[in-house]
Image (tube, helix red, strand yellow):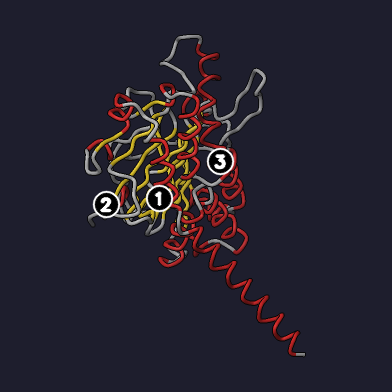
Amino acid sequence: MRGIRLSFVLASMIVVGLALWAGAYVDQTGSRMATAADRLLVTLSGEQAAKARYAYDAPERLDWHFIPRPRKGLPIKDLRSEQRALAFGLIESGLASSGFLKATTIMSLEAVLKEMEQGRGPTRDPELYYLTIFGNPSDRGKWGWRVEGHHLSLNFTIEDGKITAATPAFFGSNPAEVRQGPRKGLRTLADREDRALRLLQALDDNQKKSAVISPEAPAEIRAANKPQPPTDAAEGIAYADLNNDQRSMLRALFESYAQDMPEEVSRAWLGEVRRAGFESIRFAWSGPGDRSQKHAYRVQGPTFLIEFNNTQNGANHIHSIWRNMLGDFGIPLAH
């Protein structure tokens, strides 16, 4: 009997130890980012480092955008093969596996656009994505980093080894659906589009009167390139006015955005959402309930804002973003 009790105690200690180890690992994402950034930085030439590094409080840190434009930072294109491996190690540290797959697929779509446009559009290059590091990567003090290019802008702020901000977090896709060629049928952001459409279709006629805020979709997401999210009041149907199945669908929608981020970020985002309460979250749709037509949606609560827009190129060009209504870039939003 004593041997059984001892075995039970040892097994319990192992389980507790594993749980503590797992929790510690999850909470060390900021430290792993610092390590990944450092490993890349030590390989850079003086010229490369001059492109990659900025002061933590440089205005450049807040100058985010997702359009094809000249950018500050160090492009992947300018890295040697061993440096590229380290660069993608840093990018991977900022995403869950699903988010990393989305990000790298978004990059790869530049080759599809190049083929489609045949030189008629802006420069299309899957390697024209830029890494920028603000401050000194460390487990002490503040620093940040960004990976950005066409249709991708991920922005992180770290303090004392902890991620204190991971917004704005932008993913776009052009084409939203590849309709020709060897990659025909590829839909990079299908989950973000289809979950919202299924929720809309699950609403009854009276609910749709609240949820559909406009028969036409806006041309673009709001506050693109702005350091802070728009502060307009949430519109649409409230979580409290949905039935249980519809509530599950709405939770699955906003949770899917969070789950593309590292576990530590996902837990923080969804923890803020739970603490603020689900009841005041609103879902708003604009345009027809048909993904072949121009459409957009928002999900907004006290702590977060999701915007999704598919209106360009015949409703085959997606912009989607998660923003923090408490303040992007770790900067408290003045109310």
Q: Residue placed at 50% from the left, 58% from the top? A: 26
The amino acid type, in three-letter code, at marker 2 is Ile
> Callout 3 environment at 10 Å: few (<14), some (14 to 19), or many (20+)?
many
Q: Residue placed at 28% from the left, 54% from the top? A: 141
Tag 2–tag 1 contact (CB < 8 Å): no
Q: Position of residue 171 (x, y in %)?
A: 47, 37
Instruction: Examine the image and state in which quarter residue 188 appears.
Output: top right
Q: Nearest the camera: 284 or 73?
A: 73
Q: Earlier in the sequence, mark 2 or mark 3?
A: 3
Q: What residue does disc 1 label?
A: 305
Tell me the CA gap for discs 2 and 1: 16 Å
Instruction: Examine the image and state in which quarter residue 277 appears.
Output: bottom left
**231 on left or right of 210:** left
Q: Nearest the camera: 13 or 33?
A: 13
Q: What residue does disc 3 label?
A: 193
> Callout 1 environment at 10 Å: few (<14), some (14 to 19), or many (20+)?
many
Q: What residue does disc 2 label?
A: 331
What is the secondary structure assignment of the residue under circle 1?
A: strand
Tag 3–tag 1 contact (CB < 8 Å): no
Quadrant for the N terminus in the image: bottom right
> Callout 2 environment at 10 Å: few (<14), some (14 to 19), or many (20+)?
some
Q: Which of marks 2 and 1 is nearer the N terminus?
A: 1
Q: Nearest the camera: 300 or 183?
A: 183
Q: In this view, does 103 lie above or below 93?
A: above
What is the secondary structure assignment of the residue under circle 2?
A: loop
Q: Position of residue 65 (x, y in %)?
A: 35, 33
Q: Nearest the camera: 115 or 144?
A: 144
Q: Where is residue 187 in the image (x, y as percent from the top left)?
A: 60, 32
**244 on left or right of 84:** right
The amino acid type, in three-letter code, at marker 1 is Leu
Q: Where is residue 27 in the image (x, y as percent from the top left)?
A: 46, 59
The amino acid type, in three-letter code, at marker 3 is Glu
